Amino acid sequence: MISIRDVAKLAGVSPATVSRVMNGTANVDEVKKQRVQQVIQETGFKPNEAARTLYKKSAHLIGVIVPNIENPFFNEMAKAIEGEAYERGYRLTLCSSNDNLEKEKNSIELLGRMNADGIILLTNEEEIFDQIADARIPVVVLDRAVRHKNEVASIISDNYEGGRMGMEHMLDAGCRNIVAMRGPQNLSSGRDRYKGYLDICREKHVKVQFVDCLYDYEDGLRSTEQILREYPDADGIIAANDMAAISAYKILTRHGKRVPEDIQLIGFDNIIMSRLMTPELTTIAQPITEMGSKAAQILIDHIEGKEVPQKNIFEVKLIQRETTRNKVTKA
Amino acid sequence: MISIRDVAKLAGVSPATVSRVMNGTANVDEVKKQRVQQVIQETGFKPNEAARTLYKKSAHLIGVIVPNIENPFFNEMAKAIEGEAYERGYRLTLCSSNDNLEKEKNSIELLGRMNADGIILLTNEEEIFDQIADARIPVVVLDRAVRHKNEVASIISDNYEGGRMGMEHMLDAGCRNIVAMRGPQNLSSGRDRYKGYLDICREKHVKVQFVDCLYDYEDGLRSTEQILREYPDADGIIAANDMAAISAYKILTRHGKRVPEDIQLIGFDNIIMSRLMTPELTTIAQPITEMGSKAAQILIDHIEGKEVPQKNIFEVKLIQRETTRNKVTKA
DNA sequence: CTGAAAGCGCTTACAG
DNA sequence: CTGAAAGCGCTTACAG
């Protein structure tokens, strides 16, 4: 492999000068600069990042830790993060933790050893923050509201408002017997959505009816069965998220219920799949791509020494599609 | 940050000895070893990977380049790759190229500069191989049949046999007017699936009917419309892949066609979504996870100097679900 | 503007 | 078994 010394020799300058030309880090005599650039061209010299990293203690690397990269929600986030990071000259290294705390910890340790510049965290393990503090790497928390020392910022959408909007829409759509799936209560998104739902119930004097449900397909199946058992006359389901809504649609269909004629259904997130499925899913949209980009942007801004907003809350909005009916005017 | 010299000092040995203890690369006196390990424990010393990389010219890093990480197929592959790589002590850096050749090239160049040990390639840009040759990094090609110099191995499933199986199943299911979506002909998977379909047509004396279709949702929509226009009496569609089948289902439903009563539908790939959708999709399954793992395994084996099989072809199999009917016994 | 020198934090021949 | 030394390939004070 050709090194900076080789280039220097060929161009008749010192390695320091070559470095200065490459990085534009100081003025260099124009003709020498030309010569250096020419030699770089001709030899196809590529600087060794490891050497650079060793000196600068920065690998231009961002670690992204997601619970499961297969999940469309994280997946779309990851894509947005990757896009933004790439634009800014950072690479991304991925860890799909699969709820394996050991793996998460290992990944963070390794990130430290690799001189990663920052971490974007989409998981919720409290324990992990010690590890992060240890590695002394700035972290941006995405879709989670945690408070911790090296946390630079958090990016989240307005789940509370989304919870309200979902319930309001079901009421507007004419549902009179709504059951909510309450999302995981160890996550702020689950808590806030549920709180929004509750507040509308109170304001409109509607009975609170819910079952618990995780954010995944399997548990969506289970909890829909539970709803059908415990609330056989339900005419509306507010799913914990889109994935659970996909499960709900399947179970409802299995039981011969038509959506939205017999029972209406709303999701949360607006993952791509919600639009691909048939019927298309009504849902509360989080701006997933914007949130992912923002996370990368804020982290990199911070890495580069800029001042950065700590709390970043994105608006959600109702996207009405085919699993709920249009607003019915009261008789 | 604490370095190997600090550890050495505290343990009363030389840095070389600490290195030997950490890496188990030579015998070290038992009591010194104990002391070193103790100091490492107490100080929480973590070796700097950049320094190690600089010397060894290996970052224990694998680059994965996919056309689009959002696509469930690549996504599931990526997860499998990540899992295997992690087990073997390699990290993974991700590039979602979005069919941007420039980005792909940049990524590969950067991979070289970062001392990446290998690349797993899921894209099909011919041009890119020059870049790879330039970077002198071994590459394993996944789901693509390309032949090139630094290509260590290729992993692929038996698309030809899958093409045959799909068509045979449609015939068995009682279809008499089948239309195939012919996948992208610049990809071996598209060519081979189509070839399998053709051969069954010939063997069974069935008319060849097809439209062209890319592997994505949008084009699936378009090409299904085309089928309905050009072959209004079709009673079976062989989709280019599962994603296109998802589109087809939507368009068919829009046109008031029931699946499988009026028209039967089969996909290809067995992405997770094919099982989540309602009705569940009949499809030809590729062992996506196994293929991803294998790719990582083979690449790492090669990196570590082992001999490795060049061609790796995985079997496909029919998974009959709800969009086709059971075998009808001939009258 | 520019080069010689030191240093980033490891690893591994080389001697002993 | 073990340490001193050199080297991996850069970057940046420091002098001039």
Image: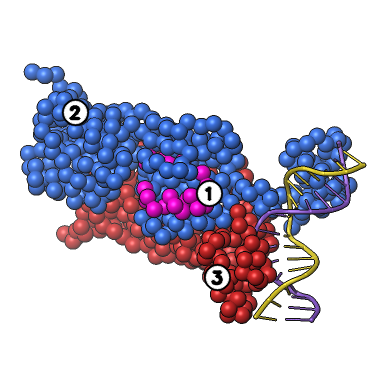
Chain colours: A red, B blue, C yellow, D purple
Both labels 2 and 1 in a single chain = yes
For disc 3, the neighbor class at 10 Å (few under 14, some 14 to 19, many from 20) is some
Report the front residue among A233 and A212. A212
Callout 3 touching callout 1 (CB < 8 Å): no
Q: For residue B200, which numbered disc appears in the image?
A: 2
Q: Is residue B51 left or right of residue A308?
A: right
Q: Amino acid at mark 1?
A: Arg
Q: Amino acid at mark 3?
A: Gln
Residue beneath disc 3: A37
Residue A64, horizontal then vertical, whole percent: 52, 53
Mark 1 packing: few (<14 Cα in 10 Å), some, or many (20+)?
some
From the image, tell me which residue sits under label 1: B136
The answer to whether marks 3 and 1 sit on the same chain is no
Task: Tell me if mark 2 has few (under 14), some (14-19) or many (20+) residues whose alpha carbon lies within 10 angstroms of its own.
Answer: some
Of circles 2 and 3, which is in front? 3
Q: Report if residue B194 is visible in the image.
A: yes
**Mark 2 residue element:** helix
Chain under callout 3: A
Quadrant in which residue D7 is drawn:
bottom right
Image coords of residue B73 (percent x, y): 37, 43
Bounds of the magenta segment:
B124-144
Helix or strand or loop: what does disc 1 sit on?
A: loop
**Circle 3: element type:** helix
The answer for how far apart the CA atoms under marks 2 and 1 are is 43 Å
Q: Is residue B232 left or right of residue A139?
A: left
Q: Report the residue at 24% width, 29% height from top.
A: B164
Measuring 38% from the left and 35% from the top, which residue is drawn there? Answer: B156
Q: Is residue B302 above or below residue A13?
A: above
Q: Sequence order check: which comes first, mark 2 or mark 1?
A: 1
Please state which of residues B289 and B155 is positioned toward the viewer in this rendering.
B155
